[in-house]
Amino acid sequence: MRLSLFIPANMEAILVEWESFAATLLPAAHGMSSFELRDHAQQILEAIARDLSATQTRQTQIDKSRSVAPVSVSAPETAAQTHAVLRAQRGFDINQLCAEYRALRAVVLRLWLDKGEAEAPGLEDVVRFDEAIDQALTESVSFFSSQVDRSRNLLLGMLGHDMRSPLQTIQMTANHLAQLNDGQQVSSAAARLIRSGARMQGLLDDMLDFSRTKLGLGIRVAPTPVDVAALVADELEQLRVAHGTQSVKLDVTGDTGALCDARRIQQMLGNLVGNAIKYGDPAAAVQVTITGGDQEISIAVGNGGPAIPPSVLCRVFEPLERGPGAETRPGSEGSLGLGLYIAREIAHAHGGEIDARSDESETVFTVRLPRIAPDACEYPLHQH
């Protein structure tokens, strides 16, 4: 009997073995019913049997091996994909998910051979069965990973949101202690609390923004008429206080009036300048240059110091990426490696772009923002 016929004819025996193995995947499988353990196993096997009985060209076989098999328009989500989501929600890990398919492959072939129903051309059936199992596994792993990522980002978002209230209480108490001016010891302790609270606030903000982008929500912006140069100057004053040993210079050319989110622009600049201070030559000034053009405004942040290797530069805007030697640099304990990623997302939210170049003389990050951010046309733009 061909394998495409054997699977439907022996469906129950195969499902019993699937269920028995799934029940051993603890602790996730603890307390699951027979229906839950079997989940979409029958639909997955039926899809495999249909695939085995269908005519397959050489090109189709090659496409499967490259994970580019065609997707049915009428069924955009396969049984294997739905199975993966449900397993992720039940607490299975990726190794347990893969183990199910490994066991399924072995069970079907063992039953087929034990019953003596394998026949010529059996080798072709085995090859095509392996392909079908691999396709189902690929679909499951992809959806499983997406579900895990989504759950993690939701958790990070909820954690960041819930931590804000106690953090604000700590910050308010620290500020109150500082205002009491009750001796040098209390003032110093209050100052440490304020600095630590500000650092923690920055970490939470980065975590929440990261979670939003990974959930597909993007960075929220509320554009209003602003003077970008004034925003930058104000942010630089605060950065100079925080990094008193580092010189930060500002040059402005042209009209810098625009419609954008003031808080987000300052956040983006803080990330870029903070990065320049952290990785640049501490003896060289950080140079911020703002240029107002006809249609856009550019903000360039440059610093001296070692060149960023090309292998690092091409990934510098990716999340959780940190520069060479970041672990040993002062202030790195307050970084998640999200600053440049969030700066890019803020630029994109304004309809702009950001790029980087680096050589032995300097490293420069340049942001180009349109004068009018997307969906901000209802605001009048006042020229400066």
Image (tube, grey):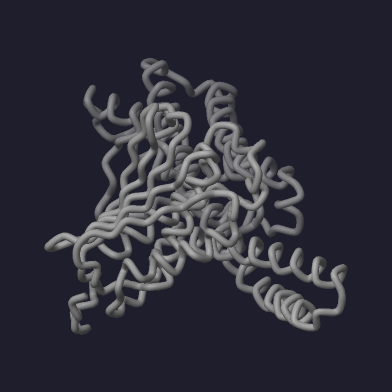
**Residue 322 image point, x, y percent:** 54, 40
| Residue lying at 63% horizontally and 46% vertically, measured from the top left | 332
Quarter of the image that includes the N terminus = top left
Closest to the observer: 202 or 81?
202
**Residue 311 image point, x, y percent:** 42, 27
| Residue lying at 24% horizontally and 71% vertically, measured from the top left | 258
| Residue lying at 66% horizontally and 36% vertically, measured from the top left | 328
Q: In the image, is residue 125 above or below residue 9? A: above
Residue 210 visible in this rendered orientation of the protein: yes
**Residue 124 image point, x, y percent:** 37, 19
Kindly indicate the quadrant of the structure image that contains residue 155: bottom right
* Left or right: residue 158 compared with residue 11: right
**Residue 174 image point, x, y percent:** 76, 75
Kindly indicate the quadrant of the structure image that contains residue 215: bottom left
Kindly indicate the quadrant of the structure image that contains residue 208: bottom right
Quarter of the image that includes the C terminus = bottom left
Residue 75 visible in this rendered orientation of the protein: no
* Left or right: residue 127 compared with residue 32: left
Closest to the observer: 163 or 129?
163
Q: In the image, is residue 113 above or below residue 252? A: above
**Number of marks drawn:** 0
* Left or right: residue 258 compared with residue 102: left
